[in-house]
Image (cartoon, rainbow, N blue to C red):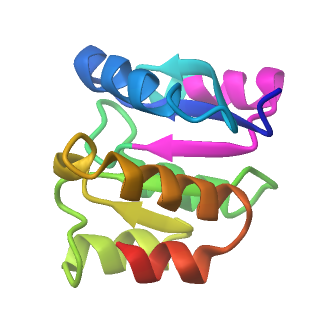
């Protein structure tokens, strides 16, 4: 039985499918749902009680940074930001972490470094953010 319930928030159908495929490789995770917008994710967070959330930064209507700011005011699962703009040392990465993301991973590396992605997701879900931040 999966230990971690994952909610994926990304506006790209292709990326949502890719993430579901990669995450399903690890029996510690189960994707409970994938949201195409922050608006739909809000209710899913309440109804499905995910234990970890992946969040894209470039989203329609409400972007990832604004959503992180919104979540500061409430209890929520740890958040792993997935964006090609959050590479090591980038301003976007610093911005995401300073707005409440628990860790970041370069979206462009999900397939080529699936093991690193899953380790980062696991560290984030388990509250080992210092490890997640150190890896990527």
Q: Position of residue 25 (x, y in %)?
A: 50, 29
Residue in the foreground of this view, choosing between 19 and 100: 19
Magenta segment: does it hold 25? Answer: no
Up/down of 13 relative to 132, above or below: above
Q: Going by the image, does 36 lie left or right of 125?
A: left
Res 58 → quadrant:
top left
Residue under the image location 39 percent in, 52 percent down: 115
Q: Going by the image, does 129 lie left or right of 22?
A: right
Res 53 → quadrant:
top right
Residue under the image location 53 percent in, 25 percent down: 24
Q: How many marks?
A: 0
Up/down of 129 relative to 35, above or below: below
Q: Going by the image, does 14 lie left or right of 21?
A: left
Residue in the foreground of this view, choosing between 71 and 3: 3
Q: Position of residue 30 (x, y in %)?
A: 66, 26
Q: Position of residue 118 (x, y in %)?
A: 48, 49
Res 78 → quadrant:
bottom right
Residue in the foreground of this view, choosing between 12 and 6: 6
Up/down of 114 relative to 9, above or below: below
Q: Position of residue 62 (x, y in %)?
A: 40, 39
Q: Going by the image, does 9 lie left or right of 91?
A: right
Residue in the foreground of this view, choosing between 68 and 48: 48
Q: Quadrant of the C terminus?
A: bottom left
Q: Quadrant of the N terminus?
A: top right
The range drawn in magenta is 41-55
Residue under the image location 72 percent in, 31 percent down: 45
Residue under the image location 54 percent in, 61 percent down: 69
């Amino acid at each position: 039985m999966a230990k971690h319930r994952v909610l994926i928030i990304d506006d790209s159908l292709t990326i949502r499918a890719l993430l579901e495929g990669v995450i399903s490789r690890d029996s510690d995770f189960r994707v409970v749902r994938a949201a195409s917008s922050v608006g739909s994710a809000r209710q899913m967070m309440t109804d499905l009680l995910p234990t970890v959330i992946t969040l894209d930064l470039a989203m329609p209507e409400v972007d990832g940074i604004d959503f992180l700011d919104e979540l500061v005011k409430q209890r929520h699962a740890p958040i792993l930001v997935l964006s090609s703009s959050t590479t090591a040392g980038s301003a976007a990465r610093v911005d995401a972490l300073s707005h409440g993301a628990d860790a970041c991973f370069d979206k462009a590396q999900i397939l080529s470094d699936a093991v690193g992605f899953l380790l980062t997701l696991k560290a984030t879900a388990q509250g080992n953010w210092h490890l997640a931040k150190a890896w990527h």
